[in-house]
Image (cartoon, rainbow, N blue to C red):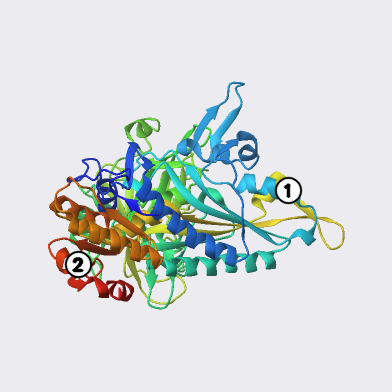
Amino acid sequence: MVTRLSHLFLRTLRDDPSDAEVTSAKLLVRAGYIRRQAPGIFAWLPLGLRVRARIEGIIRDEMVAAGAQEVLLPALAPREPYEATNRWTEYGDGIFRLKDRKDADYLLAPTHEELFALLVKDLYSSYKDLPVTLFQIQDKYRDEARPRAGLLRGREFTMKDAYSFDIDDAGLDRSYQTMRDAYERIFARLGLEYAIVKADAGAMGGSKSEEFLHPIAVGEDTFVRSAGGYAANVEAYVTPVPDALPIEGQPEPVLLPAADTPTIDTLVAHANEVAPRDGSPWTAADTLKNVVLALTHLDGTREVVVVGLPGDREVDLKRAEVAFAPAEVEAAGDDDFKRHPGVFVKGYIGPQVLGAESPSGIRYVVDPRVVDGTAWITGANERGVHVSGLVMGRDFTADGVAEVSDVRAGDPAPDGSGPLETARGMEIGHVFQLGRKYAEALGLKVQDENGKLATVTMGSYGIGVTRILAILAEAHNDEKGLVWPKNVAPFDVHVVATGKDSVAYDLATDIVAQLEGERFEVVYDDRPKVSPGVKLRDAELLGMPIVVVAGRNAADGVVELWDRATGERSDVPVAELLDAVRAI
């Protein structure tokens, strides 16, 4: 059945939409694939749905081939299961909550671990029923504070989520590897470059977590990798801990009065001037920076915490959010300082008066590099005064260690595989070994071989369907429009008839019939009162892999053939067209 542009629900735009931030959002809206309805919320139009269906088909093929079975759970979920796992609270403002007419609480599910666990609990009772892996392709909802970049970070999005259920940890390992392998096949079929990186499990929980990141300039994730094979999201990077140093015999601390040294740079310059050391000058790495953070806990209480880290490092708030999860983290403000009068002297904060057991009661944690026996230049808690030679484990202690400092190119990989390089990426898939967190909370148990109840162990596996569509659009375009890969394009061939007489239209109609007879999916621009220039611009914008133009040489039985991926255009006799299309 021919899809004719004269009847297709489609309007293209000549100019980029003013609210689109990235190339994919601009082109998908201009080409009539999606339309913005609200921040982070989009309507899907016929062309967009066709691409989405192609992507879903590839994912579905590989999931079924891996032994997973498809189901569909509701997007609207009751509060009780999420309350049992504590995620109703842990998600904070990140989910959409609502009430029905009877005042019962519901949410628009951001993910479905709880409901899948309850489904299996309802139907299965024996180890003989396991293992089983279930999946769905379903819309998810998250109340993003700053929805951005079109489909790359939305509030409503489509995800394939799968869940494995096993009787023991060995079974979970097998299920996890099966899904991981399926993901590699999916992304290979989609032509997506990816890096598999260690990741933080976040609100999902679990013992093992890996992300599939697509390297892309507009990516919101920073990841690191080494030539030796290590790869991790920066949130999951673990700093190699140096050996502790002997404390005995180290000189006593020395005060460094200075009129105005509130920054690391001014402090280092002053130290080199008034207290130079033999061998090498002082650097920022010799100073201990004490950064005040404010944590907002799930119950709404606000806590001030101080983090000590080498002065050549900065606090990475995303890493801090992981370190202090599930609390929200931000830099402390003036009101936070006012609540602790006499404790903080800005620019001269030192660890001597900090600690949960100190009179201030303010928790003090340190970077992993701050180990016992290391000596530092840091604040003396008096305006205009620093101190040199303050030794960790002798002159101050910490309440714990926190991975909050930035990760940089050149830092060592924790597995010893060499220095790191950094890259930007976008998450396209995530696999988790959840273990028994959800099963225990929801009472998911089956009888084992000995007739005793055993808690089931779970895995969770997600792929961002609509995000992948946007990434493909981001990666496959030129200055004229989209250039879809052949396996996800809404149509294989775009046939265009131009001119005012019937010759080109008759020829184009014959070509469409031939292509369809060869099982090509064809969209036909048969619009009678649209100029050739508009039709050709639309053909470039819409992005089908092959374009056939019946125009000025139609009377001679010659058409123009475009290969959008290479940009090559050639005149082809109609008798040779099918072979030329097959060759592309």
Mark 2 secondary-structure assignment: strand
Q: Are marks 1 and 2 in contact (CB under 8 Å)?
A: no
Examine the rendered structure and indicate whether residue 144 appears above or below residue 323: above
Q: Position of residue 350 (x, y in %)?
A: 36, 48
Give residue 121's mark. Answer: 1
Quadrant where the C terminus lies?
Answer: bottom left
User: Going by the image, does 392 lie left or right of 271?
Assistant: right
Q: Nearer the viewer, residue 11 or 576?
A: 576
Q: Is residue 39 left or right of residue 95?
A: left
Q: Amino acid at mark 1?
A: Lys
Q: Quadrant of the N terminus?
A: bottom left
Tell me which corner region of the image, top left, top right, bottom left or bottom right, holds residue 228: bottom left
| Above-or-below relation of 428 to 65 | above
Q: Which mark is residue 396?
A: none
Q: Which residue matches tag 2?
A: 559
Residue at x 53% of width, y 63% of height: 61
